[in-house]
Amino acid sequence: MKFLYSLALLFSMATIPAAAELTYTATKVVFSQPGSYTQIQLEGVAGIHAGTKFTETNLGEAAQRLVDTGFFEDVEAKLETRGSSVTVDFDVKPIGHAQMVHVGFENFVWLSHAEIESALQAKSPLFQDYLFENSALLTDFDAALTDALAAKGIPAKVIHLTIEPTLARPERCIEFRIVSPSVFVANMKLGGVATELVPLIQKSVNATAKTSYNEGLGGQTSADRILAPLLDAGYIQATLSNVTLEPGAISANAAPVVLSAKLTSGDVFRVSSIAFAGSPLLSAEAFAPTLKLHPGDIAARALLLESLAPLDAAYRRQGYMDVIVDAVPTVDLITHQVAYTVSVKSGEQYRIRELTAKNLDPAARADFDRGFHMTAGALYNPEYVSNFLKNNTALQALEGYRAGFKAYADPNTHTVDLVLTFVRGAAR
């Protein structure tokens, strides 16, 4: 993104020659339109406070420091003097979170969120859990989190990756993750478990034990796994509270953690209705026969997601990577029924900007170029990519290859760089 910088100096005195640049002492520092940033944060970055001595050159440098954070569309610095009073006014225009990507922290069981923020704000004081997907700060943050863990005696390898939105978690996010040591759930201690819930909690234990610990924004979290059997049994208000983590000793590059929490289950709910008015890509008439839930059924979350899947897929096939298909519940606490109202927020369509196919020999590459039709400018369809090899058995030169793919989306330009990596040695 291009950031603009302008400097306007307003004086109540005659113009001073550049060779005689004056030194001022700030009486007051003002930030117009600061958004969610505090006065203390902004002054810290700019380096100008009440009482600071500075020149016009210093003021320009202060504005540039704000620009260089990467969190502003525009910065304008104004200096106004009235008698002995000197007011510095920075007109800043923060970039909205909608233009950035939410940042999550998957398994930092040795660090509180406050400690994580402290480590990262030491690198970037204005960081507030949102970054650009290609931000230069990402590798700096990997190092900062590695250092914060090392300070606690934990030798770790930290990476970051982009998690694409899904039906269950319809938000693109950047996740920071400890990949070494491997953090996993060794045991769970749940309070508030009624006798009738024991069979469901046993399913939770079986599903969660020995799996990677995850409290991030993407994928299935450990809390998701614990609650899934209850949510699928109609306990739609089931929650965990008072969650605590007790990391164990690291052994053989594995780090066990004991998760303790209080379970609140609520009551079992049944479906009273599922309403959908229809959308441009799927009519209400076409949606209704695909429903897996019907009035009178237990309100199972898994079946609700299955019911929404055709609607979600219809939009993703047309390039709507950020589509949000929502089923807003209206709960009747007396009858223990829930009515769902389904809606779609499509977002923008994404198109292929660049296509890269790796590790193909010349003959296979020729077959690929001939048979793969989702080229630059085409709408991005993940279903097409997933099914490409299976659906193109006539491309004989690709026999014996298997492939994985990664889509690098740019939410600002709504484009995708698609990379397919082929590997020999497996039949399609």
Image: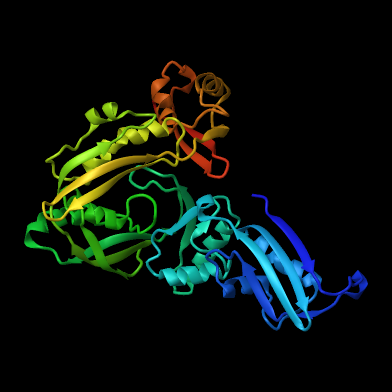
Q: Where does residue 119 sit, x and y in percent of width and height?
A: 51, 70
Q: Residue at x 43, y 58 (%)?
A: 104
Colour mode? rainbow
**How many numbered marks, from 0 up?**
0
Q: Where does residue 340 sit, x and y in percent of width and height?
A: 24, 44
Q: Is 397 above or below relative to 425?
A: above
Q: Is residue 149 visible?
A: no
Q: In the image shown, does 88 or 248 lie closer to the viewer?
A: 88
Q: Is residue 76 left or right of residue 271?
A: right
Q: Is residue 282 left or right of residue 363?
A: left
Q: Quadrant of the C terminus?
A: top left
Q: Residue at x 42, y 48 (%)?
A: 171
Q: Is 300 above or below relative to 127?
A: above
Q: Residue at x 54, y 39 (%)?
A: 414
Q: Is 424 above or below relative to 263?
A: above
Quadrant position of residue 237: bottom left
Q: In the image shown, does 37 or 190 lie closer to the viewer?
A: 37
Farthest residue toward the left? 195
Q: Where does residue 231 sit, x and y in percent of width and height?
A: 20, 51
Q: Is 67 above or below relative to 23?
A: above
Q: Where does residue 202 sit, x and y in percent of width and height?
A: 14, 56
Q: In the image shown, does 169 or 25 lie closer to the viewer?
A: 25
Q: Residue at x 39, y 51 (%)?
A: 218
Q: In the image shown, does 12 or 413 lie closer to the viewer?
A: 12
